[in-house]
Amino acid sequence: PEAYCHRTMLDAIHYLVDNGIKWRAMPADFPPWDRVYAFFRRWRDLGLVKEFHDRLRAKVRTRAGRDAQPSAGVIDSQSVKADAVVGADSRGFDGGKLINGRKRHVVVDTLGLLLAVVVTPADIGDRAAAEVLLAQVADAHHLLELIWADGGYTGPLITFCLTALALVLVIVKRSDDQKGFVVLPKRWIVERFFAHLMRTRRLVRDFERSTSSAEAMIYWSMTLLMTRRLARPRPSRA
């Protein structure tokens, strides 16, 4: 049946993302690798993986007692090394992190669930990418009002968010008397999100030839997280 076929394809992609295997190393228990890749590419190009992801996010938020649409989020970026298959046109050098590769710019809600992602060469500045990313988020989530960010997002971006997107951008900084590792309010939420990405082995570094595939892999990683959460039994109420 078609439903069984789709479930098998979903399981195959989740296996690839979670275990970090090559496409051609797909286990024999799944369909042939080229069929799975064709399924992945079709869902990527038609935006179906994002639609699937967004529906799961709404279910997770509702189950947690939240509105399906968020009103606040957190923005940050993560630079990761790029594999040799990544061309020079879509990779760069992040001088701050000393990483040659790509940068993942994300906005998550207050539960740490992904709202949007843009993958760029690592030399693209956070503020430049944030204008594009936040415009996408504001267009898709009309109830969104507040975004928390670190000190890398200061400057004209605050005014741009308020005037062009009707978003309040709040900078969360470490106080002068804080030294060493400090868990900052709201900022830890997006750091936990990045930690989840690092647990899915396909995302430990960027192995994708195109940035669109790199973004799709992040959505697939989050669908894996959310399906596991939804599969847990609801806590009993005494």
Image (tube, rainbow, N blue to C red):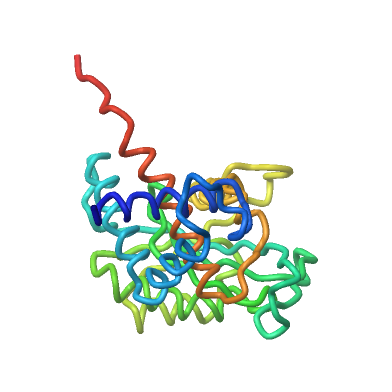
Residue placed most toward the observer, 235 or 199: 199
- Residue 103 against residue 110 in the figure, above or below: below
Residue 32 is situated, as x and y percent measured from the top left of the image, at 50, 58
Q: Quadrant of residue 123?
A: bottom right
59 sits to left or right of 89: left
Residue 233 is situated, as x and y percent measured from the top left of the image, at 28, 27
- Residue 32 against residue 179 in the figure, above or below: below
153 sits to left or right of 3: right
* Number of numbered discs overlaid on the protein picture: 0
Residue that appears at 41% across and 63% down: 147
Residue that appears at 38% across and 78% down: 135
Residue 35 is situated, as x and y percent measured from the top left of the image, at 45, 64
Residue placed most toward the observer, 134 or 168: 134
Q: Quadrant of residue 95?
A: bottom right
Residue that appears at 32% across and 55% down: 6
Residue placed most toward the observer, 129 or 224: 224
- Residue 170 against residue 5 in the figure, above or below: below
149 sits to left or right of 111: right
Residue that appears at 73% across and 43% down: 180
Residue 171 visible in the shown view: no
Q: Quadrant of the C terminus?
A: top left
Residue 71 is situated, as x and y percent measured from the top left of the image, at 29, 59
Residue 99 visible in the shown view: yes
